Amino acid sequence: MSFMKAGRLFQATLLLISALAVTACGFHLRQSAALPPAMQRIHLTVSGGGEFPRMLSRALELSGVTVEDNAGPGIAELRVPTASFGTDSLTNGGYVRITEYSVHYQVQFEVIDANGHMLIPPQHINMSREYSYDATNTVGNASQVQQIQHSLNQDMVQAILFRLQAAGKHDGGLAVPASAASTH
């Protein structure tokens, strides 16, 4: 076997071992969700603005859903009446300086099918991230909060897609109780 063939075989083996190791640890690439037929055309109503409605709309489109501008016959409705961030202080440093915060994100949503029936009852999802506050770098802190909020928006969109997909696997809607909450 020549040196070039041995090198290629080694690279291929190394790539295969790496791929197996990554999948064995539970890592999976995020993919689009397989949503039920009743949700193939959907009107999205989200309270507030920001990047969350755009991210959710884009994720639905990537899942093969047609996001309609207006509600109407044959169109399901995904309602998000609550999508809000909050911040709490966690620890205090010397001289009563706050050194750690927690950013909370709460979203409530429900899905009404094209016939006006509740497809997914109100669902509440709560997520949070903690971060350290540096009183000497207020610009960096604002940037850190924006990055945390962006990350929470991404994770929230995925959590909603997982719940929508679960509704398709259970005839008649989502089996998760309306009071269920997930915290990350």
Image: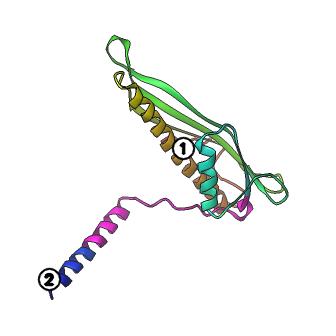
Residue 166 in sight: no
Q: Residue 3's x, y, as percent?
A: 14, 83
Could you tell me which residue is drawn at 36 percent across and 21 percent down? 135
Residue 111 in sight: yes
Of residues 170 and 56, the one nearer the viewer is 56
Q: Quadrant of residue 172?
A: bottom right
Could you tell me which residue is drawn at 48 percent across and 36 percent down? 146
Q: Quadrant of residue 105?
A: top right
Label 1 vs label 2, nearer the camera = 2
Of residues 10 and 163, the one nearer the viewer is 10
Q: Earlier in the sequence, mark 1 or mark 2?
A: 2
Mark 1 → mark 2, Cα distance in angstroms: 50 Å
- As drawn, 153 above or below 173: above
| Location of mark 2 (residue) | 3
| Magenta region includes residue 124 | no
Magenta range: 14-41
| Location of mark 1 (residue) | 153
**Element under disc 2:** helix
